[in-house]
Image: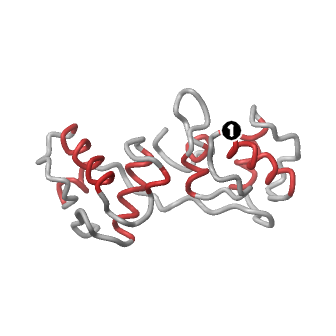
Amino acid sequence: MPATIRLGDTGEDVKRLQRVLARMKSLSPDRVTGSFESVTESAVKDFQQSQGLTVDGVVGPNTWGKLPAYREASPVLQNGSLGPVVAMVQRILKTGFSFSGAIDGIYGPQTATAIRTYQQDRSLPVTGVVNEQTWMAAAGAAGATLESLCGLTMLS
């Protein structure tokens, strides 16, 4: 079980919490910083309230126990990345996100261009790199994210 964390704490357990809250749409993905600040505390309090927990903003065993199962961050993808996750992203991009290249699992210029368009359309930093912010940005009206559409998280 992760450590008990609260306002002012920093580190990987805070980042873990923030990722879970971002996947739940309770925290903006750009808030996944590893620094437990007032916006994170407010999201924790809202979660605690919704679960009938003591609303104190402190994430201890009871709060950790009610949070959805944690997954590490999805991988950073950029020019030169290879593999099935790249192919999953290409498949999603091909279904309505301006990608006309081959679904080959090779992150090349066409994939990077489609990701830049995806990022621009979502007011993200336009880097052509699939980072945490890009994975968690809403991909459609239903609130699905690129990460969930690729099947990399249980939350949608």
Picture quadrant of residue 40: bottom left
Residue 141 image position (x, y, % from top left)? 57, 27
Picture quadrant of residue 108: bottom right
Looking at the image, the residue that sits furthest to the top is: 141
Residue 74 image position (x, y, % from top left)? 57, 58
Residue holding disc 1: 121
Task: Judge by depth and name the residue closer to the eye, 102 or 11.
Answer: 11
Looking at the image, the residue that sits furthest to the left is: 54
- How many neighbours does mark 1 have within 10 angstroms: few (below 14), some (14-19), or many (20 or more)? few
Amino acid type shown at disc 1: Asp
| Quadrant into which the N terminus falls | bottom left
Residue pictured at 48% horizontal, 51% vertical: 29
Residue 37 image position (x, y, % from top left)? 31, 60
Task: Judge by depth and name the residue closer to the eye, 119 or 103.
Answer: 119
Element carrying mark 1: helix
Residue pictured at 14% horizontal, 47% vertical: 55
Residue pictured at 25% horizontal, 42% vertical: 46
Task: Judge by depth and name the residue closer to the eye, 2 or 41.
Answer: 41
Left or right: 123, with 14 as reference point:
right
Residue pictured at 61% horizontal, 51% vertical: 134
Task: Judge by depth and name the residue closer to the eye, 155 or 116.
Answer: 116
Image: 79 above or below 119: below
Residue 66 image position (x, y, % from top left)? 25, 48
